Amino acid sequence: MSLVATTEDCPASRTFTLSYVTDRLILSCQPTHLSLTGIMDQTIVIFGASGDLTSRKLVPALYQLFQKNRLPKNCRVVGVSRSPLTSAEWQQKLEATTAEFSGASFSPSGWNQFASQLHYLACDINRNSDFGKLRDYLDKLESDSPSARLYYLATLPHLYTQAVTQLGVHNMATEGTGPRRVVIEKPFGTDLTSAHQLNQALHNVFGEKQIFRIDHYLGKETVQNLLVLRFANSIFEPIWNRNYIDHVQITVAEELMVGRRGGYYDSAGVLRDFFQNHLLQLLTITAMEAPPRFAADLVRDEKVKVLQAVRPLHHQEFSSHTIRGQYEGYRREPGVSHDSQTATYAAIQLQIDNWRWNGVPFYLRSGKAMSCRTTQIVIQFRKPPHLLFGDGSTDIGANRLVIQIQPAEGIQLHFQSKVPDGGMQPRLASLDFRFQKGYSKQFPDAYQPLLLDAINGDASLFARSDEVELAWQIVDPILNAWQNGNAPPLELYKPGEWGPATSHQWMQQFHREWFDVCPIIH
Ligand code: BG6
């Protein structure tokens, strides 16, 4: 559904747009040509068209959106990479992968309709003349009517700056005939300096409002649900603070090993691959204050305040407040150095210095080759101040809220209950909410809502430049300390375990325990 109407609320040169996007009603008041996004033509230009991300994620997500009738009516996709392919060859290649990643929802006739809008142009980002050809190609495609454009950088990260600069040189970022937006995949830099340089390169060509730094964790329904859980209910906020919460654990465990990505992973490691982006994003959403409205800058202002309040680690804390591990066999993975010191597992204790969180540690951890795939946020509440039951000395366990982001999405609340026919003996019981049971709808892949938001110019779920740099300011000192010997020992762990054994002793020294349950909800 898309409805466009002028109202008294909008100046004459602007239109008031109400559109229905990913089950949300979006109201906006924008300059006339921008508000036409939903109904004006759209060109999505994917740099890195022959890569894995395009075939596994982007094109299947666009295909699903097309099937759900959520894309603008005239939406074309132009793939750009160096491989010498024709449009027909690119379409053919993508048909197989889209069928594989779309499962039962794939239909050959639907694909044929969608594929007729897929175009391909071989282009070397480093070659000036190729970019000129790309500009002319796009102008010709769009010659019938003005079109919005979304440039998606899914290419090798070291080419981002060059691609953006070329877009500027060829005047392809100017919003004369419609919006021009750019989406940038992670990794956004490899440290604070490179992230800052990339931001500068982007700002030389695009305004911040045109830039969409993607973190696919923010596209996950359960991550967005965390905002709803916190800010659309009144029962959680009063206890969501240092008065009731003892600590928070955020875990992203993967069963997967590095596989074919050894070359990239060995230079990145778990801090760059997971902490700087996904884990810190989960932290900000768990810890942020309620913004006045759900609007891009207001949401991001609150997230930025959390990052600003994260207490930097100092001196011996780099080794005492962090843990490093590497799974056995990692050094034999293709592309990995035989004496690699890269961590495939890490845990870090962070403190947030503000009124809400003072004294509440946040434990962040992530690892490859762990015992199972689970992403969960555990809100561990304090124990009751005084025990009435038992002899008063028994540890009965405190309340806990487990928010399971994946694989099975849901929430579990742990609370004390009376053991029947057992006197006044308390025991921890649980209440479950499973999305699968509550809603019949299939969860969309994270790229679907994010692509749609980028097309519609809604940056609420994308990182702003200051946010990305602040995240690096937290991770960079740890990386530097580790590199310069101020690090905990790199402990080996067997694939299929919850990281190194020392990780449990590490938690015990803080008088806490990891919540190691392989998906609590199935
Ligand atoms: C990517 C990381 O950002 O996220 C990968 O680079 C990781 O190492 C992947 O496997 C995990 O994503 P998801 O959505 O499967 O949790």
Image: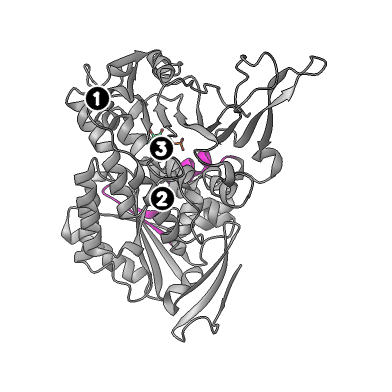
Task: Tell me the amino acid under the disc marked 3.
Answer: Leu
State the separation of the CA atoms marked 3 and 1.
23 Å
Name which of mark 3 and mark 1 comes first in the sequence.
3
| Residue 115 located left or right of residue 269 | right
Whether the residue carrying mark 1 lies under 8 Å from ligand 1 is answered with no
Q: For the magenta stretch, what is the residue range?
A: 76-103
Task: Please identify the quadrant where the N terminus is shown.
Answer: bottom right
Q: Which residue is mark 3?
A: 279
Q: Is the residue 104 above or below the residue 87 in the image? A: above
Tell me the SS state at disc 3.
helix
Q: Which residue is mark 1?
A: 316
The answer to whether mark 3 and mark 2 are in CB contact below 8 A is no
Whether the residue carrying mark 2 lies under 8 Å from ligand 1 is answered with no
- Of 255 and 353, nearer the camera is 353
Q: Is the residue 448 above or below the residue 206 in the image? A: above
**Res. 169 mark:** none
Which residue sits at x=40%, y=13%? 501
Of labels 3 and 1, the one closer to you: 1
